[in-house]
Amino acid sequence: MKARDLTGQVFGRLTAIKFSGRTRTAGGESKRNWLCQCTCGNELNVAVGALTSGNTTSCGCYKLEVTTKHGMWQSRVYQTWSDMKTRCINAEHKSYEHYGGRGISYQESWETFEGFWLDMEEGYADNLTLERVDVNGNYCKENCTWVTKQTQARNRRKHPQNKTGVTGVRIWVDKKVDTPYYVASSQGFDGKVIQKMFSVLKYGEEEAFRLACKFREDTITKLNEMGAGYAESHGK
């Protein structure tokens, strides 16, 4: 496969000038590098992956400016913003398939931390995490809020390997007696799992599944009445 020509392409503050050779990482991986010029005038060699993923967008001058402007370079919320971007644009990130790989992106003004912080400063606390209200929607002011880790855990999408089609309801087989069960699970306030099993042998396939779904729905209703905060989009 012919290598991609990046000449003249712009990546943030960097403009690719020419291919500058390969380097090998400590792990033996070969990386292609391009000589780039920053808008501040500095020139530097950057790995292609760092350019195309958005991980490197300046010679370092932007980070220096950000640090000077708001002093939050090492803050938890800055890392939250950085992680959000990486999940959406870096195909090598472990969670990319669940975000950028599904078409999840972020609003244009959130390309900079200042833009993100302007929209999301209200309501932030260091014990909260960033969550999308619609788990199939993009990261933007209208679709994001700050929630506790417990609430975020409750509101995550169905796992890609979910075989029942219902979040929190799974199939488990007791191998000792070769009996399948439908297991309903929910997370309580203390972080402990509320769980109940329904035997296919006792109730039949369809009824065991129905009972497991009903038990979980009833449990979530009770937890929400107590302020648990399961979202309407939970598991979608």
Image (cartoon, grey):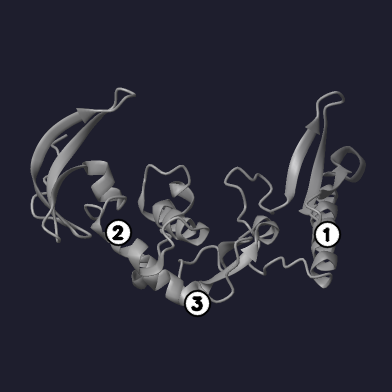
* Left or right: 85 as drawn, with respect to 50: right
Which element type, helix, strand or loop, lies under badge 3?
helix
Q: Which residue is mark 3?
A: 142
Q: What amino acid type is highlighted by mark number 1?
A: Lys
Q: Position of residue 63 (x, y in %)?
A: 31, 58
Q: Is there any visible trace of residue 4 in the rendered image?
A: no
How packed mark 2 is, by other alpha carbons closer than 10 Å (few <14, some 14-19, many 20 or more), is few
Q: Which residue is mark 2?
A: 64
Q: Nearer the viewer, residue 65 or 190?
A: 65
Q: CA distance from mark 1 to mark 3?
A: 32 Å
Q: Which residue is mark 1?
A: 214
Q: Nearer the viewer, residue 1 or 212?
A: 1
Q: CA distance from mark 2 to mark 1?
A: 54 Å
| 2 vs 1, front mark | 2
Report the quarter where the C terminus lies: bottom right
172 is higher (above) or lower (below) than 185:
above
Q: Position of residue 45 (x, y in %)?
A: 16, 42
